[in-house]
Amino acid sequence: MTKITVAKGDGVGPEIMDATLSILQAAGAQLDIDEIEIGEKVYLSGNTTGISPDAWDKIRTNKIFLKAPITTPQGGGYKSLNVSTRKFLGLYANVRPCKSYHPFVKTKHPVVDMVIVRENEEDLYAGIEHQQTDEVVQCLKLISRPGCEKIIRYAFEYAKQYNRKKVTCFTKDNIMKQTDGLFHQVFEEIAAEYPEIENEHWIVDIGAAKVADTPEHFEVVVMPNLYGDVISDIAAQITGSVGLAGSSNIGEECAMFEAIHGSAPDIAGKNIANPSALMHGSLMMLNHIGQSLVAEKIHNAWLTTIEQGIHTADIYDEKTSKQKVGTQEFAAAVIANLSNKPSSFEPIQYGNRAALKLPTYQKKAPSLKELQGVDLFAHWNGTNPNEIAEKLKGIETKNTELVMITNRGIKVWPNGFKETFCTDHWRCRFQPATGDTFSKEEIIQLLQNAENQGLDIVKTENLYAFDGKRVYSLGQGQ
Ligand code: NAD
């Protein structure tokens, strides 16, 4: 018997959770259910996190969490409970299998069988955003080496366990050379440890187009958080319905299982939602806790039901379906098929699908870190780069000189184009003259001089070389 935390969520959540639990129970899953209340009611009671400390305690004690979708109320400073659960519990891997069920579920892509492995904790979802000037806001994209190593190793270990032959990586490292560049570099390093698994890298834009056009090309695809969020919805939708795909969120201690779709308030309370996505999430959970035989039985019963043409409204099609059913009737049909195996689809045989045990991240020896200069970001309302350059030359110290000004990343001084549009946000790079050393004292002096001159500096960014390699971007055109 495994104790699990269950949250029935909002919108269609309670209906699809009841349907899923009825199937799990009828199939003989050994589960002791500890229910918590999270989501809309908790938010609207004045708790902006959507979850009580008590509920957190249960989730952390039980470690396995089956969660129905929840509604995050608009505005009012409400924090997304999905994002905070993934981050607080260190659920670094979001695994989303997307498969088409042709010819029983209508799809433009009869052969989709791909698994998106999405990094779940960092990237632009670190949620570090600031407004710095009247015209410019920023969001920090954080990519860490441990984050990359953990998710990429997870993707290769997953491929090994599920007999997948290829792992693909998507990044945009032709533009983001440091952040996506690190993700791609770690992918190459870890891929080399798995010579039996084919590997490839695609730039994310053409990769996404390929997913939408030729999804049969892909098996396991690993990518940073934002790309994974977008592309896994595309991959799920092209199989026929977002109501089909489940997902797991895996951490070193805890794991959360859910549907990939939201709370679907437009169809809530009508007994028409498809419970299959949450049910698929629950099958991933059964595998994770070592109850693969029960998962296998349910999966085969579900495939049989789909083959029989017993379909909920989202996948019902006059040509391919036989009977349109509601949420509860669909669950009852799956339960009635629990002793059956599909005849058109290949019956499922899971074998060993227990939780993957990955080695813990080993910290690397620190690199030799050399400070080479500083970028000062100024809020200035003028439009002529030569004018701000004049002011900035006035704050140079004995050892530093102004070497470049960019506006939204484009070099505008020295020798900028008069056509370049400039906002009120100027990145001003100071570096020592050749041969001079540079220290943090210089930065303090530059800031003091700027303050004395009435220049509004809104942010500084140190420029480093690690082990002799420059690891900051040049201005475009520099
Ligand atoms: P949604 O996924 O809830 O709905 C999108 C469309 O898909 C709707 O037309 C809906 O009717 C349909 N749909 C979704 N699930 C279905 C199912 N099981 N069966 C049949 N049709 C289904 O996305 P949305 O409308 O953008 O978001 C609604 C709410 O859900 C928002 O408050 C959002 O914050 C929340 N949300 C929660 C989660 C989560 O809890 N993991 C994920 C995404 C969105």
Image (cartoon, rainbow, N blue to C red):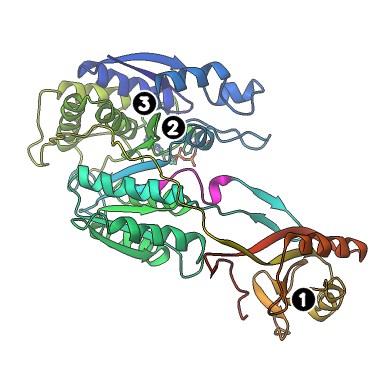
Using the rendered view, name the quadrant where residue 48 is placed: top right
Total numbered circles:
3
- Indicate yes or no whether the magenta region holds residue 123: yes
The quarter of the image holding the N terminus is top left
The amino acid on which the numbered mark 2 sits, given as a three-letter code, is Ile
Disc 2: which residue: 267
Disc 1: which residue: 401
Quarter of the rendered image showing ligand 1: top left
Q: Residues within 10 Å of mark 3 (few under 14, many from 20)?
A: many
Is there CB contact under 8 Å for labels 1 and 2?
Answer: no
CA distance separating discs 1 and 2: 63 Å
SS category of the residue bearing label 2: helix
Q: Name the foreground residue: 190 vs 377.
A: 190
First reached walking from the N terminus: tag 2 or tag 3? 3
Q: Nearer the viewer, mark 1 or mark 3?
A: 1
- 299 on left or right of 179: left
Is there CB contact under 8 Å for labels 2 and 3?
Answer: no
Residue that appears at 24% across and 30% down:
287
The amino acid on which the numbered mark 1 sits, given as a three-letter code, is Glu
- 14 on left or right of 37: left
Q: What span is colored magenta in the figure?
A: 118-126
SS category of the residue bearing label 1: strand
First reached walking from the N terminus: tag 1 or tag 3? 3
Q: Looking at the picture, how far across and down is residue 56, in whole percent? A: 51, 21
Disc 3: which residue: 16
Q: Looking at the picture, how far across and down is residue 228, in whole percent? A: 42, 51
CA distance separating discs 1 and 3: 64 Å
Tell whether circle 2 marks a residue whose Cβ is less than 8 angstroms from ligand 1: yes
List the single residue furthest toward the left: 343
Q: Could you tell me if residue 99 is visible in this image?
A: no
